[in-house]
Image (tube, grey):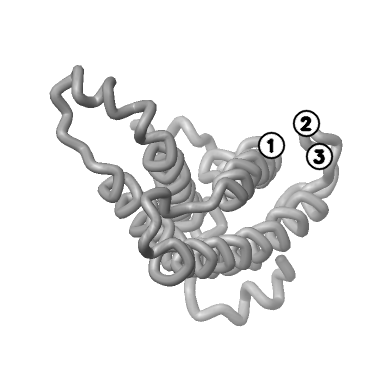
């Protein structure tokens, strides 16, 4: 980030390049991921419930099909709401990034390209989550309200495809922290010529 712009900020940046000790975006990312994975897995479980019912009965687990769908719906709803904050925090932290320009990731990308792809991908994924939530809501409350199987197979296939896209997108984010040292306290201290091991003493 431009040093003149940093000088104009009202807050002081720490060794990790942020005005706070622990980056917010990576923590919210894991919440987004967990909620979306649970949403899709439970919708799949609800769809395959006739196959699973004997297993659940054998294990003395009292479960009903609509219960699986409830978990899927509310987790997807929570995922979409949280993702707005995830993307907002991501862009704020991206604006404060000061990555090295002479390093390539394991995928052969520079820091700028990785940041660009991760930022654009985040917005596209947020859009996909909103679309999935609307689609899921229409199935739950309108189209399949009186049908035992609450979700369409096409919805589940798109959800599984999104899990794969999330893996690629998350790997780009991991490269930013591990390979470029973006908002990594130890990397920041090394760049400043300080010893990160002193934090442990």
Asked whether disc 1 touches disc 3, contact meaning CB atoms under 8 Å apart, the reply is yes
Q: Nearer the viewer, mark 2 or mark 1?
A: 2
Picture mark count: 3
Give left or right: position of 84 versus 113. left
Residue 22: x %, y % from top left: 42, 52
Q: Give me the disc on residue 179.
A: 1
Q: Quadrant of residue 97?
A: bottom right
**What residue would you read off at disc 3?**
103
Question: How far apart are the alpha carbons under marks 2 and 1?
Answer: 8 Å
Q: Is 78 rendered above or below residue 29?
A: below
The front one of 154 and 133 is 154
Say if residue 193 shows up in the picture: no
Q: Give me the disc on residue 106.
A: 2
**Residue drawn at the location 17% of the way across and 29% of the way down:** 61
Give left or right: position of 68 versus 118. left
Q: Quadrant of the N terminus?
A: bottom right
**Residue drawn at the location 45% of the way across and 40% of the way down:** 44
The front one of 155 and 81 is 155
Asked whether disc 2 touches disc 1, contact meaning CB atoms under 8 Å apart, the reply is yes
Name the element at disc 2: loop
Name the element at disc 1: loop
**Residue drawn at the location 62% of the way across and 67% of the way down:** 127
Q: Is 96 rendered above or below residue 46?
A: below
Name the element at disc 3: loop
Residue 197: x %, y % from top left: 46, 30
Disc 3: CA contacts within 10 A as few (<14), some (14-19) or many (>=20):
few
Disc 2: CA contacts within 10 A as few (<14), some (14-19) or many (>=20):
few
């Amino acid at each position: 980030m431009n040093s003149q712009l940093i000088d104009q900020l009202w807050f002081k940046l720490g060794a990790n390049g942020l005005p706070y000790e622990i980056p917010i975006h990576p923590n919210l990312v894991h919440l987004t991921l967990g909620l979306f994975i649970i949403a899709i897995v439970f919708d799949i479980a609800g769809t395959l419930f006739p196959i699973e019912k004997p297993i659940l009965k054998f294990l003395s687990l009292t479960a009903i099909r609509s219960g699986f769908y409830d978990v899927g719906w509310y987790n997807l709803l929570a995922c979409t709401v949280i993702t707005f904050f995830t993307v907002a925090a991501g862009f704020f932290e991206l604006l404060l990034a000061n990555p090295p320009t002479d390093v390539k990731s394991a995928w052969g990308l520079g820091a700028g390209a990785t940041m660009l792809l991760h930022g654009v991908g985040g917005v596209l994924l947020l859009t996909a989550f909103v679309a999935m939530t609307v689609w899921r809501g229409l199935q739950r409350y309108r189209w399949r309200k009186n049908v035992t199987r609450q979700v369409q197979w096409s919805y589940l296939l798109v959800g599984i495809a999104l899990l794969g896209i999330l893996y690629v997108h998350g790997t780009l984010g991991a490269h930013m922290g591990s390979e470029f040292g973006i908002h990594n306290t130890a990397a920041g201290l090394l760049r400043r010529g300080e010893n990160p091991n002193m934090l442990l003493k």
